[in-house]
Amino acid sequence: MKKALLFGALALAGVLTLPATSTLAKKATGPVAALDTDDDGTVDLKEINKSATDLFTRLEKDSDGTVDIKELKGRVSKKDFKTADPDNDGTLSKDEFLTMVAALFKDADPDNDGTLDAKELASKKGKALLRVTR
């Protein structure tokens, strides 16, 4: 009887502690941790745009409000740059840059859920997106 009570108490104690340990969120690492400002374990377009805007500001050295292919320092291909430059002036305004970032985000989001997880960011398209955010 004592063994049954002890076993029951231990089992109950284990059940009571289970929810506390199972509800602990995994701490994101890598690119997700660097970009995930709301700590939900994924990265959405708003978070990507914040990082991309910060990068645009850092790269835009000549204070003309645009970046050219040289200022982007190999972060995008010439083809992608040309696609992102609809007025063909050889530069990207911040709006043009963020439009390109949004297109790269969409390409990196194959399940179209509006968020990117670590696996999606590790894909070829995810890596292309990361190059314009850091």
Image (spheres, helix red, strand yellow):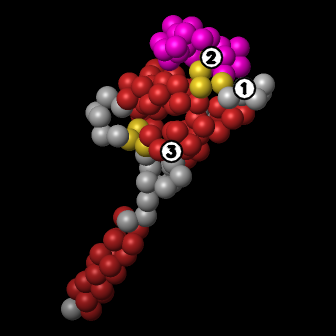
Label whose residue precedes the other's in the sequence (1 or 2): 1
Q: Are marks 1 and 2 in contact (CB under 8 Å)?
A: yes
The residue singled out by tag 2 in the image is: 91
The quadrant of the image that shows the C terminus is top right
| Mark 1 neighbour class, 10 Å CA radius: few under 14, some 14 to 19, many 20 or more | few
Label whose residue precedes the other's in the sequence (3 or 2): 3
Residue 55 located left or right of residue 95:
right
Label whose residue precedes the other's in the sequence (3 or 1): 3
Assign the magenta stretch its main secondary structure: loop
- Kindly identify which numbered label has been placed on residue 47: 3
Q: Is residue 69 magenta?
A: yes
Query: Could you tell me residue 132's position as x and y percent?
Result: 58, 27
Query: Could you tell me residue 118's position as x and y percent?
Result: 45, 38
Secondary structure of the residue carrying numbered label 3: helix
The residue singled out by tag 1 in the image is: 64
- Res. 59 visible in picture: no
- Mark 2 belongs to which amino acid? Thr
- Mark 1 belongs to which amino acid? Asp
Q: Nearer the viewer, mark 3 or mark 1?
A: 1
Query: Could you tell me residue 112's position as x and y percent?
Result: 29, 34
The residue closer to the viewer here, 93 or 41, is 93
- Mark 3 belongs to which amino acid? Glu
Magenta-highlighted residues: 67-90
* Residue under the point 51% across and 39% down: 48
| Mark 3 neighbour class, 10 Å CA radius: few under 14, some 14 to 19, many 20 or more | some
Secondary structure of the residue carrying numbered label 1: loop
Where 91 falls versus 4 (above or below)?
A: above
